[in-house]
Amino acid sequence: MVVAVTIALNCCAAPTQDAPPLNWFKKTTEVIAFQLNKAAQTYQPGQNPRSVNPNGTVRTAGLTDWTTGFFPGSLWYGYELTGDKHLAEEAKKFTLALDSVRNITNTHDMGFMLYCSYGNAYRITGDKTYLPVLADGAKHLYNRFNPKIGVIKSWDFSWWHYPVIIDNMMNLEYLYWGAKEFKNPNYAIAANTHATTTMKNHYRKDYSSYHVVDYDPATGKVLRKATHQGLTDESAWARGQAWGLYGYTMCYENSKDPKFLAQAEHIASFIMNHPRTPKDKIPVWDYDVHNALDTEERAPRDASAAAVIASALLDLSKQVKNGEKYVDYAEQILKSLSSDAYLAKPGENHYFLLKHSVGAFLYNSEIDTPLDYADYYYLEALKRYAEIKKINH
Ligand code: GLY
């Protein structure tokens, strides 16, 4: 079903030469309505579409998958962007299927899993029946915080002692929100402390970040700085830079601590001024790939990193006095992602929105594929863009 979307243009938007202003946005929302409705009909709640396998089948995310909250969250954002009430009904169905995620205690990913699904459900509907699941998930995330080390433990698996990944910055939003909703200031203290420790130990002088920092659980000493999904321990994994930018922007918004804003602006500068950023602003999966592995032309891009960067920059633009440069850069990303090069044609791409993301290149996993979190942050960025540009459906 294609939903007719009427765009009320910002009074001051400058006309472009090739098309009436914001035509690209209108076309994009039509594709979104079509793809999300078809996806909701095609996939089963609790088995959410995650990516596409090399053999062309769809990899689904079950209840313990870190990405399981993104498809329900995409349906909620799709509803907000298009006004299509049917998407809200589907979003509710796909959200409620994640009820048992509230019992998970062995990962930091509770924010991705529950705040993106149940969190959006509650934000949009105000329905308090979503709260008990959110309360359990926030408690379990907080319980992974060790005040002696000053960070939340990301993973319980593998050879690491007390691993913290840069991605963990994203899950702090759930704690800031939980601190207010459940009147527990300890949640915000944990989030602030985690962000401060991560600033100290994850970042290099050029404001690129390590992916994983492993701590000694007994002393809090840093044992190792390494990568899990990047090219090398010393490289700048593209999505890691995106998670950090988004994380510090969000931490400033919640805490108003100026050091977090400064950190966000430094990371933005690393990304926006990087000499290996392609013309269309969609990064290769690791900023250091060009030298070490491949030529830029052959190396896969990561649309998911670009979508997270766009969403973060739009948020950052609201936190600073002269935010226009961040809006402009995010707009360039969104126009690229909304072009035929990245955005699926209606009915194609297994009903995902975006093509061309990378999950974990060196594990030969999810290379040049759609990804559920690319779609989620693309939708969030479009919503933020629409708010800034005063585009109404
Ligand atoms: N949080 C895992 C990833 O970004 O791939």
Image: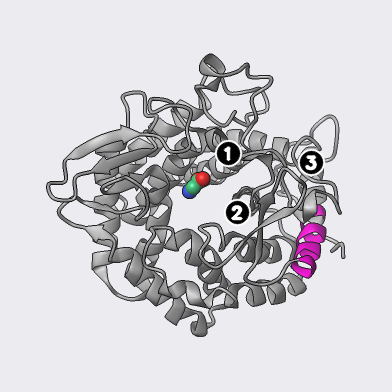
Q: Which is closer to the viewer, label 1 or label 2?
A: 2
Q: Position of residue 282 (x, y in %)?
A: 63, 32
Predominant secondary structure in magenta? helix
Q: Residues within 10 Å of mark 1 (few under 14, many from 20)?
A: many
Task: Give the extent of the magenta segment.
Answer: 31-42
First in residue order: circle 3 vs circle 1: 3
First in residue order: circle 1 vs circle 2: 1
The answer to whether marks 3 and 1 mark residues whose Cβ atoms lie closer than 8 Å is: no
Residue 317 — which label?
none
Counting the numbered discs, the total is: 3
Going by the numbered disc 3, the residue's amino acid type is Pro
Residue nearest the observer in this picture, 385 or 62:
62
Image-quadrant location for residue 198: top left
Q: Is residue 98 left or right of residue 41?
A: left
Magenta segment includes 34: yes
Going by the numbered disc 1, the residue's amino acid type is Val
Residue pointed to by mark 2: 380
Q: Position of residue 101 (x, y in %)?
A: 48, 71
Residue pointed to by mark 3: 21
Residue nearest the observer in this picture, 295 or 314:
295
Going by the numbered disc 2, the residue's amino acid type is Glu
Q: Residue at x 58, y 78 (%)?
A: 96
Residue 327 — which label?
1
Image-quadrant location for residue 365: top right
Q: Position of residue 179 (x, y in %)?
A: 32, 68
The N terminus lies in quadrant:
bottom right
The coloring applied to the image is: one colour
Identify the secondary structure beneath mark 2. helix
Q: Label 1 vs label 2: CA separation? A: 14 Å
Identify the secondary structure beneath mark 1. helix
Q: Position of residue 31 (x, y in %)?
A: 81, 53
Q: Is residue 72 left or right of residue 246?
A: right
